[in-house]
Amino acid sequence: MSSQSEGARMTPGRGSALVRLKHVLAQAGWSVGPVIIALLITGGLLLLMGVNPLEYYGFILRKGLLTPVGFQATLTRMGPLLLIGASLIVAFRAGLWNLGGDGQFLLGAVLASALAAPLDSLGSPVWLTLTAGLAVGAVMGALWSLLPAMLKAWQDINEIITSLMMSFLGVSLANVLVKLVFFDTGTTVPETRTLPYEHRLPSLFGTNISSGLLIGLAAVIAVHALMTRTAFGLQLRTIGANPRAAIHAGLPLGLLTVAVFALSSALAGLAGAVEVLGIEGNVRADWNPAYSLVVVPLVFLARFNGYGTIAFVFIFSVLSIGSESAARRMGVPNHFTLVTVAILLLVIALTDMAAQRRRNRGGSE
């Protein structure tokens, strides 16, 4: 009798564990499946270009992952991308589209560079120089989002349009600042003053990996915890899921909208500061890596999950670093990785549509 009752008590536990396992496997399938499909499609495009896809992907893996130099470059590139991923998770979870990340990124980079290099030349301690540069980058990013945030919060103007317009203006303003205000008079090419390599963000464990990677990882994990484990995160998710319900619940929709934009844009500005203070050392005129819109499909692929975002940013960084070498070696266009990302975005849309139809069919039954 007792053994039967113990078995009966254990069965629900086993059943719930199996349900959780099936759920995890299903989520993994919906996330990894689009990546495989996108790689197959881009492989077909490579065949049309006369390039062996297996050789191309193998070369990317070797250069971006399996060599010490490439692996360190991959991890270093992840730092700013993770900060942008954290920025997008905050906005998307709250149902807001902050697509102005490129402008926020560049303005944060320019202001961080313009402050850090002069401070360093005045003999400021390295920790103070770097802290001030990171702070001014984040503040600049947040300030640049105030107009779209207020227009959305109190005039209900579409933030996709306003944030994209502000991004365009931000990129243009960053170039103007580099060329006319913060340029280094000792160079022939317009660029800000260069922060010496030894005074940039420290490397990790005696390698060439910038500690910006740790800043990016900390930001994504903190944002994930904020959105899933705190009351503030619950309020933001409620706004994203059902704004009318949020209003009826008494949530200050306008203030929360501004807060989301400020936090999201501050992270994007911080990404620009990390890029400059940890990797580039300065900002050149007309420089724009355009990371923000590239990270959007990665965040969607991760289903706005922080840990999933880390995984997909790592995959993209391997592809990005490896494809730069592959472009020179195999004659593939340098930006072919962006084609892969674009195909990924289309595949994600199709898989999400298929998943929605499956849910609807299941509900009707």
Image (cartoon, helix red, strand yellow):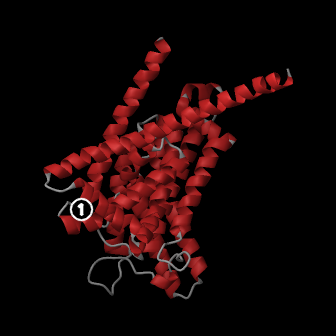
| Quadrant of residue 81 within the rendered picture | bottom left
Q: Position of residue 263 (x, y in %)?
A: 55, 52
**236 left or right of 293 in image:** right
Left/right placement of residue 193 relative to residue 22 reads: left
170 is higher (above) or lower (below) than 99: below
**Left or right relative to 335: residue 93:** right
Q: Please report the residue visible at 24 percent of the width from the left and 62 percent of the height from the top.
A: 334
Kindly indicate the quadrant of the structure image that contains residue 67: bottom left
- Residue with the most extreme top position: 365
Q: Quadrant of the N terminus?
A: top right
Q: How many marks?
A: 1
Residue 169 in view: yes
Amino acid type at image mark 1: Asn
Relative image position of residue 283 (x, y in whole percent): 37, 72
Rendered position, 5 above or below 182: above
Q: Residue 38 appears at what percent x and percent y?
A: 31, 44
Q: Which of the two residues, 74 or 48, is positioned nearer the viewer here?
A: 48
Task: Answer above or below: position of 130 versus 64.
Answer: below
**Residue at the limit of the structure toward the right, as seen here:** 2
Nearer to me, 69 or 339: 69
Give the x, y percent position of residue 316.
39, 56
Near mark 1 (Cα within 10 A), the count class, few <14, some 14-19 or many ≥20, is some
Q: Which residue is rendered at x = 41% and y = 70% of the image?
A: 73
Looking at the rendered structure, the secondary structure element under dot 1 is loop
Q: Is residue 154 visible?
A: no
Q: Which residue is denoted by mark 1 in the rendering?
A: 334
Q: Residue drawn at (59%, 39%), measured in percent from left and top?
A: 236
Q: Nearer the viewer, residue 240 or 217?
A: 217
